[in-house]
Image (spheres, rainbow, N blue to C red):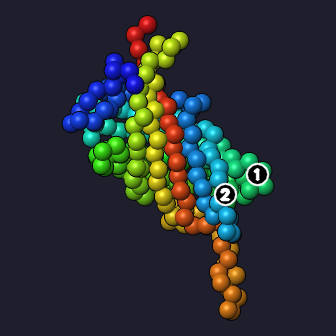
Amino acid sequence: MDAHYTRVVDGRVVPVPGEWVIDGLHSSVAFSARHLLTAMRGRFREVSGTVTIDEDPEHSRVEVRIAAASIDTVHPKADEHLRGPLFLDVERYPVLTFSGSGARPDGAELWNVAGDLTVRDVTLPLVLSTRFLGAVRHPHLPVAKMSFEARAGLRRDAFGVAGYMDTHAPGVPEVVLVGREVEIRLDVEADLRLPE
């Protein structure tokens, strides 16, 4: 970590204040959910937004926009289904958003970033368990680079994302084609513009 772009607040290393712009080419919004019995993994390829670090880190804010149609599971047929009306319905709801407005320390290294996730025009609270990985100056560009990773879990049916199949056969366990529980992982790199 570069001391010029980090500071210590209450014994924790945090980024310097400012508006850090998410670098979509070096950030990933990934997910996993069950397909029958195995885990299906994928990511959204288009993400943008800002992380505004406050003098008081607990008052920092984050705004993230994700292009729903950029979903990629490396399985074209699955992606077609996930973009369709039973799942993300990207024609009607082209953008997923997360708006966070507070960060609270959680143990020695983690922060809980509370905010609202909007999927298909349904907005529900979500807490991201977040780890700050550091900040350095880019060797060739007039920007500082900050990185963090975050995790969360949600139930997709709470957002109106259906698309599971129930056998409803007597004596036969329910068959869920795509699991209701979704695990989310964010790996984010963000830029702070520096004087030329």
Question: Alpha carbon of mark 1 to alpha carbon of mark 2: how far?
Answer: 10 Å
| Element type at mark 2 | strand
Q: What's the residue at 49%, 31% (across, down)?
A: 189
Mark 1 or 2, closer to the camera: 2
Residue most toward the top? 196
Q: Is residue 180 visible?
A: yes
Question: Could you say where residue 1 lies in the image, as x and y percent from the top left?
Answer: 40, 25
Q: Which residue is mark 2?
A: 40
Q: Is residue 32 above or below residue 147?
A: below
Left or right of 11, for residue 49: right
Residue 182 figure quarter: bottom right
Q: What's the residue at 69%, 47% (across, down)?
A: 72
Q: Which circle marks residue 180 in the picture?
A: none
Residue 168 figure quarter: bottom right
Q: Is residue 79 above or below residue 7?
A: below
Question: Could you say where residue 83 lies in the image, as x and y percent from the top left?
Answer: 68, 53
Q: What's the residue at 44%, 18% (across, down)?
A: 137
CB atoms at circles 1 and 2 under 8 Å apart? yes
Question: Could you say where residue 165 lies in the image, as x and y percent from the top left?
Answer: 68, 74
Q: Is residue 80 above or below residue 191?
A: below
Q: Which residue is mark 1?
A: 75
